[in-house]
Image (cartoon, grey):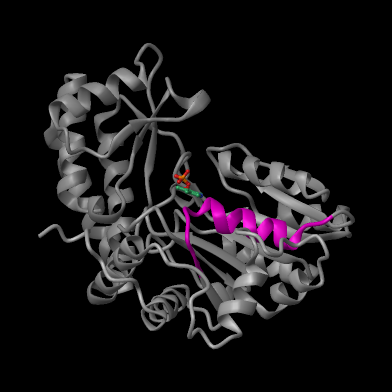
């Protein structure tokens, strides 16, 4: 029997239970809506729900996703203030505070927590504190941080927190979720431009599902993806979220230590504090094409989670996607062994450095 065929429909009770598991994962008591599409769906829904002509948004750009958000915000007719920082660093709360002071009309802030594409992570707790003091709504893209690093939605004051299952959760890419604070619901409900009777409408889900007692699903859910999301939430529960986070932190620390011991490639994000636990990005030296290097690493070990960077970073960046099941010592050691072979170096010192860093980071 093929386990993913002939599935019965997912019940409303099962759907609601998965939403509750996501809420626990996000440390929130706010409404959580599990959306039937990849994470770009709730990200666009959150922006179109909150932004409108006459609103002013601060869009913090620390990687490619921030650029996408700016385009959506502009298409909603919002005034957009872009705060861009180099993609190999992180934004600071002081920079955000200065932008808010300079533009008092800002009523919405979009921020990416961690960027898998560039390998950096931002100090959400500190940024959220200054956004809250200013009174603006805060949307956070936590797709690449959930289950890889601490994410305290309510304690930090995130109004719209968007996640997907396909990174550190080790789950499906076909469904995603957004938590919506009371303040965010009020703002979206008061926005005449917020989508209604639309696949992008959070308000439709609130009306027809959340506020209606979650007993009748408005549409047939994507049951295969929902079952996979439920299964990966169960697995995180069984392993314990702190242990899953520790594995990602250790994978990042070990990869960075091993690469530094080898010496040929260098971390794209130089500061350890700005490095995302979800994935490590590496700069290739002049004359070494990242695409060719990734192909050689995959020839040596087809299971390695490596790929060249995207867009302008395709020739000079190698990505190591040590997330989900790949956040494990065997994957990091396999990557370092292949990299040593491909660059004609001795793997032993790199493996020793990686093992020591893994142990220290996992404990800390
Ligand atoms: C991976 C990721 C997403 C999901 O986008 P994909 O294009 O499906 O990979 C969204 N936001 C961030 C920050 C991500 O890292």
Residue 159 or residue 20, whichever sits in front: 20
State the image coordinates of residue 283 (x, y, percent, origin top left).
Answer: 41, 28
State the image coordinates of residue 85 (x, y, percent, origin top left).
Answer: 65, 41
Tell me which residue sits at (37%, 46%) in the image: 279
Along the horizontal axis of the image, is 20 left or right of 239?
A: right
What stretch of residues is rendered in magenta?
Answer: 34-52
Would you say residue 215 sits in the magenta stretch? no
The C terminus lies in quadrant:
bottom left
State the image coordinates of residue 261 (x, y, percent, origin top left).
Answer: 25, 35
Q: Quadrant of residue 314?
A: top left
Q: Is residue 127 visible?
A: no
Q: Is residue 290 visible?
A: yes
Tell me which residue sits at (33%, 32%) in the image: 307
Q: Quadrant of residue 11?
A: bottom left
Tell me which residue sits at (24%, 30%) in the image: 262
Tell me which residue sits at (64%, 53%) in the image: 92
The N terminus lies in quadrant:
bottom left
Along the horizontal axis of the image, is 299 left or right of 72?
A: left
State the image coordinates of residue 155 (x, y, percent, origin top left).
Answer: 57, 78
């Amino acid at each position: 029997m093929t386990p993913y065929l002939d599935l019965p429909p997912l019940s409303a009770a099962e759907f609601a239970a998965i939403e509750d598991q996501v809420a626990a994962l996000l440390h929130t008591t706010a409404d959580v809506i599990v959306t039937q599409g990849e994470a770009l769906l709730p990200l666009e829904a959150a922006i179109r729900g909150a932004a409108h002509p006459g609103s002013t948004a601060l869009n913090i750009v620390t990687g490619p996703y921030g650029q996408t958000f700016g385009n959506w915000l502009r298409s909603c007719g919002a005034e957009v203030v872009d705060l861009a920082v180099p993609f190999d660093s992180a934004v600071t709360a002081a920079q955000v505070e200065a932008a808010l002071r300079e533009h008092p009309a800002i009523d919405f802030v979009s921020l990416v927590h961690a960027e898998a594409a560039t390998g950096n992570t931002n100090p959400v707790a500190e940024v959220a504190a200054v956004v809250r003091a200013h009174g603006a709504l805060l949307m956070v893209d936590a797709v690449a941080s959930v289950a890889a690093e601490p994410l305290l939605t309510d304690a930090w004051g995130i109004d719209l927190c968007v996640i997907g299952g396909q990174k550190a959760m080790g789950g499906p890419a076909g469904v995603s979720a957004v938590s919506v604070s009371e303040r965010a619901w009020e703002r979206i409900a008061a926005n005449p431009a917020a989508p209604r009777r639309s696949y992008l409408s959070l308000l439709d889900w609130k009306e027809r599902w959340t506020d209606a007692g979650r007993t009748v699903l408005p549409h047939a859910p994507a049951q295969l993806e929902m079952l996979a999301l439920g299964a990966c939430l169960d697995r995180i529960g069984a392993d314990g979220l702190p242990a899953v986070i520790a594995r990602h932190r250790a994978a990042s620390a070990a990869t960075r230590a091993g690469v530094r011991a080898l010496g040929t490639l260098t971390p794209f994000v130089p500061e350890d504090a700005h490095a995302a636990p979800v994935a490590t990005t590496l700069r290739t030296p002049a004359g070494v094409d990242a695409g060719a290097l990734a192909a050689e690493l995959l020839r040596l070990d087809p299971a390695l989670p490596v790929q060249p960077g995207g867009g302008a970073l395709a020739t000079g960046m190698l990505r190591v996607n040590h997330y989900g099941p790949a956040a494990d010592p065997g994957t990091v050691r396999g990557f370092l062994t292949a990299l040593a072979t491909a660059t004609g170096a001795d793997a032993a010192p790199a493996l020793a450095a990686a093992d020591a860093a893994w142990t220290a980071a996992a404990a800390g």
